[in-house]
């Protein structure tokens, strides 16, 4: 892992369908959190589940914080799976970005002109200028 992966030919429509399907899905630790948002999006675009090893393993805050501690936070998880971070100015549609959220750093999904962020009640959107780092997908 940790290398640029190949997107499926129809990735733009897969990404759009994915975002629409998650628009109103509220936060759920280990299912609909910032890490699973981007992992599920990457899976939709590439067909590869890079988060398979963690699915169902951290359903509580305590388990999630332990996992994040072990891997160096959300940025460490992204780097492990996607390779080194790049400048947020290089983020394009479908790439993963790092933002500062009220609870701390979070992963989000670049949609081109905005980013999608997992929130308590579903997706919220922020300007791409909110990105602090990015990972190419």
Image: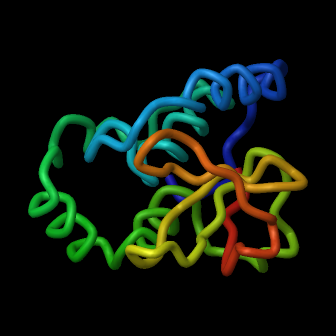
Percent of width and height locating residue 73: 36, 75
* Residue at left offset 12%, top offset 51%: 60
* Residue at left offset 41%, top offset 48%: 120
Q: Nearer the viewer, residue 132 or 84?
A: 132
Q: Quadrant of residue 8?
A: top right
Left or right: 106 as drawn, with respect to 51: right
Q: Quadrant of residue 6?
A: top right
* Residue at left offset 45%, top offset 53%: 34
Q: Please state the total of marks drawn on the protein image.
A: 0
Percent of width and height locating residue 33: 39, 48
Left or right: 114 as drawn, with respect to 35: right
In the rendered view, tell whether residue 85 sits above or below residue 115. below
Left or right: 19 as drawn, with respect to 88: left
| Colour mode of the rendering | rainbow
Percent of width and height locating residue 110: 74, 53
Q: Nearer the viewer, residue 12 or 114?
A: 114
* Residue at left offset 50%, top offset 43%: 37
Q: Residue furthest front?
A: 121
Percent of width and height locating residue 121: 45, 41
């Amino acid at each position: 892992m940790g290398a640029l992966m190949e997107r499926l030919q129809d990735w733009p429509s897969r990404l759009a369908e994915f975002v629409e399907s998650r628009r109103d899905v509220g936060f759920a630790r280990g299912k609909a959190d910032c890490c699973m948002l981007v992992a599920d999006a990457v899976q939709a675009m590439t067909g590869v589940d890079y988060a398979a090893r963690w699915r169902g393993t951290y359903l509580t805050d305590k388990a999630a914080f332990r996992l994040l501690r072990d891997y160096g936070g959300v940025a460490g998880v992204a780097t492990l799976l996607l390779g080194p971070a790049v400048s947020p100015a290089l983020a394009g549609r479908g790439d993963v970005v790092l933002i500062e959220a009220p609870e701390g750093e979070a992963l989000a999904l670049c949609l081109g002109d905005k980013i999608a962020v997992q929130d308590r009640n579903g997706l919220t959107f922020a300007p791409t200028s909110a990105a602090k780092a990015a990972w190419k997908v």
